[in-house]
Image: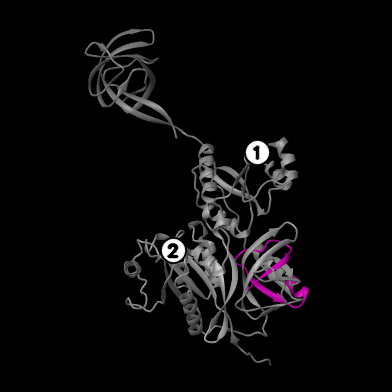
Amino acid sequence: MKTQKLIQRPPVVAIMGHIDHGKSTLLDYIRKTNVVSEEAGGITQHLSAYEISIPYQKEERIITFLDTPGHAAFTGMRERGASAADIAILVVSAEDGVKAQTLEALKTIRNAKIPFIVAINKIDLPEANIEKTKLSLAENEILVEGFGGDIPWSAISAKKGTGVSDLLETIILVADLAELSFDPNSKAEGVVIESHLEPKRGIAATLIIKNGTLKRSQFVVAGDSFTTTRIMENFLGKSIESVPAGTSVQLVGFDKLPEVGSDIFVFDKKKEAEKHIAEFDLKKTNGKDAVSVAEGCKVVPLIIKTDVQGTLEAIEKEINKISVEGLHIKIIGKGIGSIGEADIKLAQSDKNTIILGFNSNLDKSAKDINEKVEANIQTFDIIYKLTEWLEEELEKRRPRVETREVIGTAKVLKTFSQTKERQVLGAKVESGTIANGAKVSIIRRDFNLAEGKIVELQQARQKQKEASLGECGLMIECKKDIAVGDVLEAFIMVTK
């Protein structure tokens, strides 16, 4: 029996926090590259992983960072990042203190049951107040060291780099206390944190390895997706021979897009991998539940195409929040890459279909075919603009219901002359407003006798457009005879 020989492994760190508290700026400073400028609207919208090496107590130590977006749409990505991480850094602005998204991130960290460090950022700004920020943290039950608690913290300026080296050393200290280790001889275990389609090379996925070692000539399964380890690359895009725990790897060559968040299973033989996929498919089929659509609901089919899997997940999550009475949103197709001919053809199965592209445009063949069929295609590069447009479009498509709204009532006191279908009456307005030209229901002993129309209205012998409370004279056009004691209900038809 092979005995386990555990060795120390690098910590995997997730940086989390409010959308504009400096998370990406901190990552930029650490890795000396710019993420923000590549993202529309200045919001990081992809999850990635990279490694750094720092000197610590006369040796080089590696830290693997996950870049998890702070935008509200990316709750799922934040949860995935935290589940793959060993340590979290909660970035809080020294100007603003704790915000709603800070608390969301904290909840995710605590659910993942991982240690975390508070980074109080923007200490270089004039309005920065570290003590006030600590108080804001304490008010939200985040008690840092020296302020009634034991949570490590660092004061930093991500923009200038002040305090960042101390923060990195704190990460190593927390990692050592957690005693992170792995068995280098065991099969690799890990999780998919990103997947996307590379036009020239095929489907690629980024994995974080949490235990064991991933090697060449092995077979990797994630859900029902499969690949070999023939093309393994580190975060710099360089080919590597093996991947130890605590580091990331990009695998190229999956047969289908692996679902983000999937655990990976590693096999030495292809038949073992195929057997595992067959068992997964069987469980998936048996566990599938059909989504019921309420009777009378109008179905709006959607096809979603995005640049990467994580963004697709975030968009689906946001779309699932949209609820419009009388409509059911049905995603009939989704995928990674450009909008293609197959998407246009699928949309033709129902002319109500909307194709939504996020950082994804039509390829040439799709453009050619769409000149004839004119499918409804909308493309975006910021998620909230996509959801705003979709909500407006769905509101336009919502089934309208015409309802009767009573605007006033009057009781008939006298009946005067009658010419053909026109009757002159004296009445008293008891509620609301009676208006000239309004339709009325004639109510007799709680029974709706007939409907008519006010063709003339007088008060104090003067013609009026409307009357509120008090006596008035009316000429009503109605086929039924109106009697003293009848109630006239003036109403309008409202489309809702």
The part of the image, by quadrant, that contains residue 92 is bottom left
Of residues 342 and 399, the one nearer the viewer is 342
**Residue in the image at 65% along x and 92% along y:** 3
Q: Which residues are magenta?
A: 248-275
Check if residue 257 falls in the magenta segment. yes
Which residue is labeled 2 in the image?
A: 104
Check if residue 492 falls in the magenta segment. no
**Residue in the image at 72% along x and 65% along y:** 254
Residue 357 in sight in this render: yes
**Residue in the image at 35% along x and 77% along y:** 149
Question: At which x and y percent is residue 142?
Answer: 37, 71
- What type is the residue that disc 1 sits on? Lys
The part of the image, by quadrant, that contains residue 410 is top left
Disc 2 packing (10 Å; few <14; some 14–19; many ≥20) = some
Relative to residue 451, is residue 71 drawn left or right? right
The Cα–Cα distance between marks 1 and 2, rounded to whole angstroms, is 40 Å
Q: Which mark, by number, is residue 351?
A: 1
Nearer mark to the viewer, of 1 and 2? 2
- What type is the residue that disc 2 sits on? Glu
